[in-house]
Image (cartoon, helix red, strand yellow):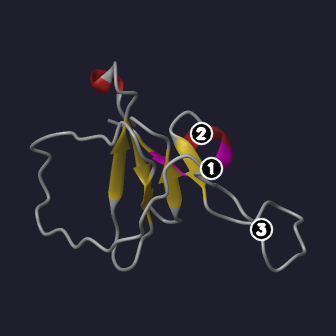
Amino acid sequence: MRVESITREAFEPFGTVLEFPEGFEGNFRIVDTEEEKPWRVAVFRYSNKEIKKIENHPYSKESFEPLKGLTVLLVAEHDTPEDYRAFVLDKPVCLKKGI
């Protein structure tokens, strides 16, 4: 398995990288919204290092923000979980619905 760096282009099929675009000089920018069904921000601490199951949120987006340490994020389209990709989670991202 190849672990990729998170870039806007590489991660686009799965969601949005939460960052300022290159050359952006402002202090505020909305990078992703959900108007139909609002969503929540939560914190989750994991301790296992083994993948036992894959999950998705078919009706809401999900964000991941690295807080401490090194993490690899596996992502795949809902219909083809065997075609997953692995990214070093070194910047915050927001997954599309169903990823």
Q: Is residue 80 above or below residue 56?
A: above
In the depicted structure, whether residue 96 falls above or below residue 72: above
Q: Nearer the viewer, residue 75 or 35?
A: 35
Describe residue 15's horizontal placement relative to residue 59 as left or right.
right
The image position of residue 67, as x and y in percent, is 39, 78
Residue 10, position in %: x, y? 59, 39
Is residue 5 a member of the stretch shown in magenta? yes
Do labels 2 and 1 touch, CB within 8 Å?
Answer: yes
> Which amino acid lies under the numbered mark 1 shown in the image of this protein?
Thr
Disc 1 crowd, CA 10 A, few/some/many (<14, 14-19, 20+) = few
Residue occupying image coordinates x 39% and y 40%: 59
Residue 24 is situated, as x and y percent measured from the top left of the image, at 87, 67
Q: What range is drawn magenta here?
A: 4-8
- Describe residue 52's horizontal placement relative to residue 86 as left or right: left
Alpha carbon separation for disc pair 2 and 1: 5 Å
Q: Earlier in the sequence, mark 3 or mark 2?
A: 2
Mark 3 and mark 1: span between their CA atoms?
18 Å
Mark 2, Cα crowd under 10 Å, few <14 / some 14-19 / many 20+, is: some
Amino acid beneath label 2:
Ala
Q: CA distance from mark 3 to mark 2?
A: 21 Å
Residue 39 spot, x, y in % from top left: 45, 59
10 Å crowding of disc 3: few (<14), some (14-19), many (20+): few
**Residue at numbered disc 3:** 29
Circles 3 and 2, Cβ within 8 Å, touching? The answer is no
Q: Nearer the viewer, mark 3 or mark 1?
A: 3
Instruction: Find disc 2 in the rendering and name its residue.
Output: 10
Disc 1 marks which residue? 7
Instruction: For mark 1, give the secondary structure.
Output: loop
- Classify mark 3: helix, strand or loop: loop
